[in-house]
Amino acid sequence: MARIRLVEIKHFRSIQSLSWYPQNGLNCLAGPGDSGKSTILDAIDLCLGARRSVSISDTDFYGLDVAHPISISLTIGGLSDRLKNLDYYGDCLRGYHDLLGVVEDEPRKGYETVITVRLTVSADLEPVWSLYSNRTANSDPPKSLQWMDRLGLAPARLGHHPNSNLSWTRGSVLNRFGVEQAKVGPALVMAARDARTGFGAKAGPQLAETLKRVTETANSLGVPIGKTATALLDAHSVSFGDGAISLHSEAGVPLRSMGTGSTRLLIAGLHRAVADTAGIVLIDEVEHGLEPHRINRLLDSLGAKDKSEPLQVFMTTHSPVVLRELSGHQLTIIRSNTDNHSANWLGTDDDIQAAVRCFPESFLSRTVLVCEGASEIGLIRGLDQFWSAKGFTSLQAAGVSYIDVGGGDPDRAFKRAKTLQRLGYKVAVVQDNDKVPTPQIVNQFKDKGGALFCWREGLALEDELFLSLPAAAVTALLNRAQELTEEGLVNAHIKTRSNGKVGLENVLTEGAKGKYSPETRQLLGLSSRIRNAGWFKSITKMSDVAQDIIGPSWNETDSAFTDSVKNMINWARSDA
């Protein structure tokens, strides 16, 4: 079956330039909003769809600049023998090498024979479809697909309104199941005739007085209408075509009346059933109208788990559920840059695949903070919620998300962050400073535009909090720690870290005087982060601490800590 090997878009809507080699099976376009995902689907539809004209306006030109024509080129492989016909298409056939990812103008051994369909629209807004190769570039008129071949290549689009695919209209998937539709013509004619006469028999008695007055008037004027006027359906106003035949349930309810999710599932299944004749499917916002378990069924119907790749699917999503269900080789991240768009294959690396499973929301954002652990995420979320309640723009509104790498190796966060950098995300690492990462890894990350935010040398987040917060806030932290842990555990941790010299009672007595010594603050930081028994080691716990204690104490907190946090927040909110 036909497959799109290369997508090239220039000066179309939000895309100035894009060159992308899609996968043979399912291609799910993900990324932040307004990055051009739907535009790519529209471009494929406009270029390859079975249409003789298309409505284009100045707003479809990149930057409203009509001086640069719209150009959409799709290089198609998996050609039928008809499309390889040398007599008609010989000059248009080209070569594509899968491993090298290149298209050459001359087909040759080891290369797949392909053909390039191009749509161009200039300032006159007149669309021109043609077949492109160097040999035919200057043909006048341009070489183009024969209409039957265009019908065969046309992609099926599953939109929010499924009516066209649940009746026997032109282009419906139902027409691909066989030739039965050719036999319904006589039946439609007879049904139309029966409807006209049947309506007249019922309408005559109800409209008798009106018909009588019409007859009298016509006779008095010599208008030849026969003995009496009748009320029948107008043959020109009411006609039955193939589109009048639609699918119904056993109870006679039109299937188009089902919910959006049900119709999408059914239509996707129908396309799968005729995959040998309908190879390319377009779906915008694949999750629309579906619960999570039905999303999975739809993806399975589209061949997401099939090695045979029955369909080539182009779809967009804003759903974390979809990202979790798909493999990395089926996910493409769309990013918009100053002068071009990029489409980056996510890949199947174990580390990045784990990130998609645990934090799929991050791959739908613009900026990602890769955090060493849950505590850092909790701190940022809590402070963001605290400041948002006071009228400041939230990080979520700025398209910022978080990934927890689970602590451990100090290089781990940079390894995951580098993968996100490769995909075009704006990325920062946020981590403790008690373990030193490899300098070479840090420098490589920074050289590519990454940012690093960490606490003072040798300190973890808990150390910073107990060293930087005012005495009243430190006491509040101790009280919260006792609420969150088993009875006596806070005291036991303090005694462990002080070798039995100091207990919780001693610390609270010191705090009651309105001041904690640097030594006590350091002891509390160490005691609060004993491995696997930390007082605040979860997103929820640290988020609550940030909202209830750190935020309200912000103006009295040591600037060495607050400046680090403010720099991170300002970086995350910036557009750079």
Image: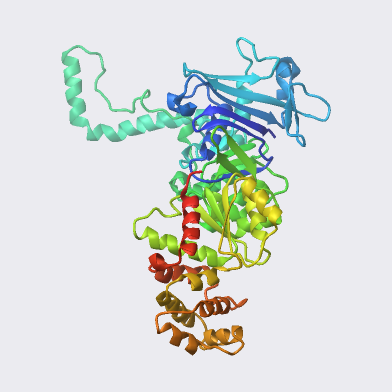
Residue 109, percent from left and from top: 84, 27
> 546 or 458, which is in the foreground?
458
Residue 327, percent from left and from top: 66, 52
Report the side of 113 relative to 332 (left or right).
Answer: right
Report the side of 380 relative to 271 (left or right).
Answer: left
Q: Which residue is drawn at the image coordinates 46% and 41% (left, top)?
A: 161
Report the side of 331 relative to 382 (left or right).
Answer: right
Q: Which residue is drawn at the image coordinates 78% and 23% (left, top)?
A: 107
Q: Which residue is drawn at the image coordinates 28% and 28% (left, top)?
A: 231
> In this view of the protein, can residue 90 be seen by the observer?
yes
Residue 306, percent from left and from top: 69, 49
Residue 335 position (above or below residue 92): below
Q: Quadrant of residue 87?
A: top right
Residue 241 position (above or below residue 415): above
Q: Which residue is drawn at the image coordinates 26% and 32% (left, top)?
A: 204
For the rendered model, the colour scheme is rainbow
> In this view of the protein, can residue 273 be seen by the observer?
no
For the N terminus, which image quadrant?
top right
Residue 443, percent from left and from top: 66, 51
